[in-house]
Amino acid sequence: MKPSKILYLIDGTAYIHRAYHAVRELSNSKGMPTNAVFGFTRMLLKLLKEKKAQYLAVVFDSKGPTFRHKMYEQYKANRPPMPEDMAVQIPYIKDITQGFSIPVIEQPGFEADDLMGTIASHAEKAGFSVVLVTGDKDLLQLATDRVSLWDPMKEKATDIAAIRNEFGLDPSQLIDVMGLSGDSSDNVPGVPGVGPKTALDLIRTFGSMKTLYEQIDKITKKKLKENLIDFK
């Protein structure tokens, strides 16, 4: 059987943040900060060298609010604004990326992970295997038999088998886990008293949030049951 083509989708926004914080202060002869540029470019070169990637794109968050802000106004309201010395480096990072003839993808109203999920789905249907280059746990839900994740900064590859082994769930079930526990990093509340461990236990037991609520009377802990009903 002919091996499938591999598409690498890089979470550009996430790696700019990680490069900015991982690399000590650097600047060029004009005093412009370059630590994020340096760290991001090093990651990109590592990918090109080690993976011999032929098909790849770098995906970025768009400026301004996303469709999630329309659904929940306080989405990510707990996050401070991007530091100015990071923001000024982004155009140069995009220029460098395009200098490698790598497409830069962004869409108003959407975050990088939204676009990565959509592109991965279309690419998989077109016969590609897809590697999501990211360290974002939110993207674990996208793993399939042909979609995996790789974090070059931690040298960590994660496929569907690894997710099943770690969580005892299929990747698609992780959506319901986060729906119950919320996501403090995005300022999204969950059900009070339901942290990640409890949420995992509930979805392992019931299989899905839908089944959990269909069988809510099987919850024996009174307060947990009340919270699940009140904060549905």
Image (cartoon, grey):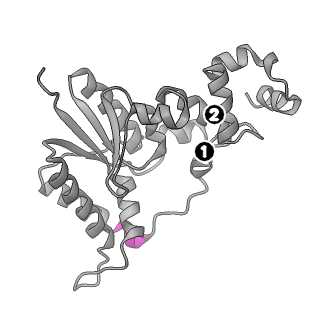
**Left or right for 57, reference 169:** left
Q: Residue furthest front?
A: 165
Report if residue 23 lies within the magenta region.
Answer: no
User: x%, y% of residue 101?
Assistant: 11, 50
Label 2 sits on a secondary structure element that is: helix
Name the kind of residue labelled 1 in the image.
Answer: Asp
Q: Residue at x 64, y 23 (%)?
A: 209
**Left or right for 230, reference 77:** right
Query: Which residue is denoted by mark 2 in the rendering?
Result: 200
Name the kind of residue labelled 2 in the image.
Answer: Leu
Query: Which residue is denoted by mark 1 in the rendering?
Result: 183
Q: Residue at x 54, y 27 (%)?
A: 173
How crowded pointer 1 is (Cα within 10 Å; few <14, some 14-19, many 20+) is rated as: some
User: x%, y% of residue 7?
Assistant: 22, 37
Label 1 sits on a secondary structure element that is: loop
In space, the residues marked 2 and 1 are separated at their CA atoms by: 14 Å
Above/below status of 227 relative to 1? below
User: x%, y% of residue 40?
Assistant: 28, 62
Q: Quadrant of residue 106?
A: top left
- Compare residues 13 and 10 and report the one nearer the observer: 10
- Compare residues 171 and 125 and report the one nearer the observer: 171
**Left or right for 5, reference 137:** left
